[in-house]
Amino acid sequence: MRILKGKTILEDFNFDKIINNYDSVIVDIGTGNGRFTYKNAKSNPNNFYIGIDPVAENMTEFSSKSIKKPAKGGITNALYVIAAAEDLPCQLDNKADNIYINLPWGSLLEGVVKGNSVILNNVVKIAKPPKADVEIWFTYNNLHEAGEMSRRELPNLSVEYIKSNLIPIYQSCGIDIVETDIVTNEDLKKFDTQWSKRLGFGRARDVFRIKAVIKK
Ligand SMILES: C[S@@+](CC[C@H](N)C(=O)[O-])C[C@H]1O[C@@H](n2cnc3c(N)ncnc32)[C@H](O)[C@@H]1O
């Protein structure tokens, strides 16, 4: 497993020993700058937070913050892992009580909205038995992301599309979608990721949220 500590990449890590001391493990796939992981880890010291992103440079800001001395904002209950959703390290198997995918782009976004089985199976793989909760927030539209939609052949998003297309695909991989809604700009601002803030303070747009359960 490749870990980012500040700006340094470590190849090996005794992960099991560390997380045993915590109530829950929360994984944020496509964490970007790692703000969500860091902020939640700071407010919930009994839980362990793992931010995952394939682009190490994206995570250096909050990875660097997390390794400072506690008086300067350092925390011990967060870890930044360099990996793509398509290729998650096996050390994470059966570890996550909660899994978030917040405002993805690129292949992660495409995987989420088309129900890519490699990504969905990896989400199931890291879920902790007997039950893990999943939350996914995503958005794009013809007005702002027409290029990406055409390049990746992304469908037009709607609650109807999620209900009739994604629920059965997710279910076939072992992920039961229990709630689908559209969040407001206020919800985005409160959610407190780098991109939720960016989008929350911008023009109103439809941001879809899926809540799901994995039972193993
Ligand atoms: C728009 S940013 C969102 C970052 C963060 N979740 C937030 O809400 O601020 C999308 C992130 O998804 C990551 N990403 C793209 N493809 C990915 C993949 N296949 N697996 C994991 N992360 C991916 C990108 O590197 C980027 O950091």
Image (cartoon, rainbow, N blue to C red):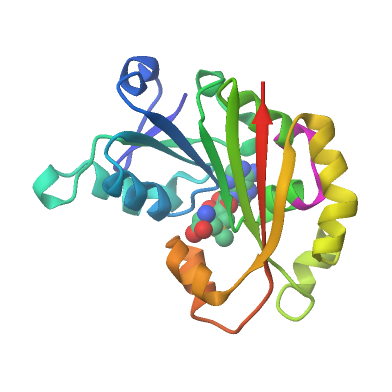
* Figure check: 103 above or below 203: above
Q: Residue furthest right?
A: 164
Q: Residue furthest front?
A: 178
**Is residue 65 highlighted in magenta?**
no
* Figure check: 216 above or below 171: above
Which span is picked out in magenta?
A: 113-119
Q: Residue 184 at what x, y percent from top left?
A: 59, 73
**Is residue 116 highlighted in magenta?**
yes
Instruction: Give the quarter of the image for residue 99.
Output: top right
Left or right: 5 in relation to 182: left
Relative depth, front residue between 199 and 162: 162
The total of numbered circles placed on residues is: 0
Residue drawn 80% across and 63% down? 159
Q: Residue 45 at what x, y percent from top left?
A: 27, 39
Q: Residue 73 at what x, y percent from top left?
A: 18, 50
Residue drawn 59% across and 58% down? 103
Q: Residue 175 at what x, y percent from top left?
A: 73, 35
Left or right: 53 in relation to 73: right
Q: Residue furthest left?
A: 71
Q: Quadrant of the C terminus?
A: top right
Q: Is residue 4 visible?
A: yes
